[in-house]
Amino acid sequence: MSDQPASPTSPGRERIRQLWWRIKKAIPILLGALATLLALGIYSYFSPDPDQLTTSEIDEIVAQAMGSATPPLAVSAQVYQTILPSLVIVQTEITGEDHEEGFGVGSGVVINESAAILTALHVVDGARVINVQFADGTKSPAVIAAEQPENDIAVLMPENPPDLFLPATMGSLAATRIGDEVFAVGNPLGLTGSMSAGVISGFDRTFTVDELDQKLDGLIQFDAAVNPGNSGGPLLNRYGQVIGIVTGLINPTEQEVFIGIGFAVPISVAASAAGGPAQ
């Protein structure tokens, strides 16, 4: 059998083959265009005419659009909402050496299901009467159940706690670093429920509490604004967890106003006064 060369494809058949190849490539595009036109037709058929919408329907559409455009709460606002149900106002009556009556205001935070309140010892030390006010407005006399003078920490037990209250969540100081955000919430200068924000400025600081003539070690240094009335209140991380109890501030002018250096007892130390676990 002799080999014969294959006959070449005719020019007509080659044009038909190229045309069919182009049609096959265009089919998905044509189908997509038809699907889009069909979807638009269905939407137009079933959508209400804007001129036929009632005022209430238009208001609802606008409200939904505005709601979806509302930004989320800032971190500081979330922290405040988290700690507010656990915040306590501590009010004291003290009889001075000259037998004159004095009054004081500090802060505290509920830390367990027994309604135990952590605060700074110098807030309640020597007080003749201690009263606390919870977030829901409930007021109650309180007594000192435990104290740690070496750490300026006191645990208060209210005589008549509210039926419902929310203990704060304890945080871990081991997870924090210099520069991390912190928030101080309390009652500075009697301004109840005030919040200030700053950062951790240092660890393992030393500070002397004038009211107790007590030197404290291992403190957290921070720059969130604190003033008289903040003492005993919580120092919080960005998750609303308590990482310290505010104990004092440094001011070389000897005036009781904030200048940028505050101190807090680490919660691992403070909570141990109430039998809490170290963090």
Image (spheres, rainbow, N blue to C red):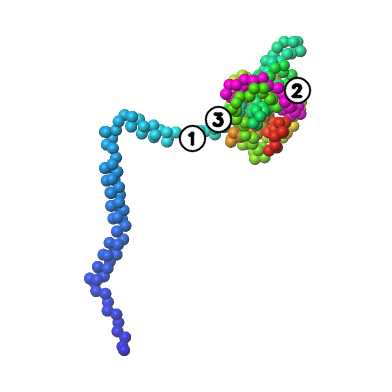
Q: Determine which residue is flagged by label 3.
A: 81
Q: Determine which residue is flagged by label 2.
A: 212
Q: Residue furthest front?
A: 163
Crowd tier of the residue under label 2, counting other residues whose Cα lies within 10 Å: few below 14, some 14–19, many 20 or above: few
Q: Does label 1 or label 2 sit earlier along the sequence?
A: 1
Mark 1–mark 3 Cα distance, whole angstroms, equals 13 Å
Q: Are marks 1 and 3 in contact (CB under 8 Å)?
A: no
Q: Residue 146 lies in magenta, yes or no? A: yes
**Amino acid type of the residue that numbered disc 1 sits on in the rendered structure:** Pro
Residue 177 at what x, y percent from top left? 65, 38
Q: Residue at x 72, y 24 (%)?
A: 144
Q: Residue 20, which numbered label?
A: none
Viewer-nearest residue: 114 or 128: 114
Q: Are marks 1 and 2 in contact (CB under 8 Å)?
A: no
**Amino acid type of the residue that numbered disc 3 sits on in the rendered structure:** Gln
Q: On the rendered image, what quadrant is the N terminus found in?
A: bottom left
The mark lying in front, picked from 1 and 3, is: 3
| Region rendered in magenta | 133-153
Q: Quadrant of residue 231?
A: top right
Q: Determine which residue is flagged by label 1.
A: 72
Identify the element where label 1 is drawn.
loop
Mark 2–mark 3 Cα distance, whole angstroms, equals 33 Å
Q: On the rendered image, what quadrant is the C terminus found in?
A: top right
Q: Quadrant of residue 234?
A: top right
